[in-house]
Amino acid sequence: MTVAHPRIGMDRYVDVDWMALAASIVRGELTQEDLNARLEEDIPGPQVRRKVGGILNRMWFPSDLSGQDLSHRAAKLAAKANGESLAAFEAVAIGAYPYFRQVVENVGRLLRLQETCTAGEVHRRMFEQHGKRSTIDQATSYGFKTMVSWGMIQRQPDHRLSPATVQPITAAARKLLDEAANRSRCSVSPLQPTDPLLFPFLA
């Protein structure tokens, strides 16, 4: 039986400020034109700018009703404290992009076992899952950069990856991540405290 790997999709860096702007649009505080203006300011290449815009749209403006419900609740959480906004960003990302979920899972598993890990260790795990291709290498590297921007991990002076400041997580944020993980994994099980998706948060 052939196993279908998730399409990469989220194969560009996504800055935390762009996520916050997109969440503001969902809340009705800003318009799409505001986000487009910021992307034009930050991303000089039109092709990359379109790609990033498409990634944000898939996360924050899904076509299905359950995805829309998740994004609206995430947008409300994104306006709150650091732990809740981080959970909101992770939820819409893993809900829309299973590949990004796998990057987070692999980073989380390694950081549960040891204080730091190398990018190469995560790359090897992603290659084992998807094959050694340049697209996998690039998408995983963009995943690291995105996670750094969102405050999930940080890069040490020796370039190893380590957890950023661990954030508290509220019941509402935990429930949102539960639903997003089930959406991404096609499962119905609640997240356990040791789940690698929860590594940025206090248990």
Image (cartoon, rainbow, N blue to C red):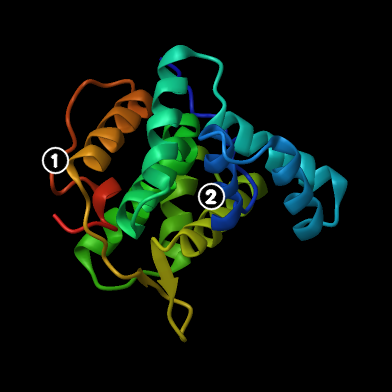
Q: Relative to 137, does residue 114 appear above or below in the rendering?
A: below
Residue at 22% x, 20% y is 188
Query: Spatial distance from mark 2 to mark 1, Cα to Cα?
Result: 28 Å
Residue sitting nearer the eye, 70 or 81: 81
Q: Label 1's element? A: loop
Find residue 111 and report its image quarter. Answer: bottom left
Residue 133 coordinates in the image, percent (x, y): 62, 46
Mark 2 lies on residue:
20
Q: Relative to 174, does residue 44 appear above or below in the rendering?
A: below
Q: What residue type is labelled 1?
A: Gln
Label number found at residue 192: 1
Residue at 56% x, 33% y is 28
Q: Is residue 15 visible?
A: no
Residue sitting nearer the eye, 131 or 58: 58
Of pointers 2 and 1, the one earlier in the residue sequence? 2
Label number found at residue 125: none
Q: Which amino acid does label 2 sit on?
A: Ala
Residue 158 coordinates in the image, percent (x, y): 46, 85
Q: Is residue 45 visible?
A: yes
State the residue lying farthest toward the front: 29
Q: Label 2's element? A: helix
Mark 1 Cα-neighbour bin, 10 Å: few <14, some 14–19, many ≥20: few
Find residue 35 and report its image quarter. Answer: top right
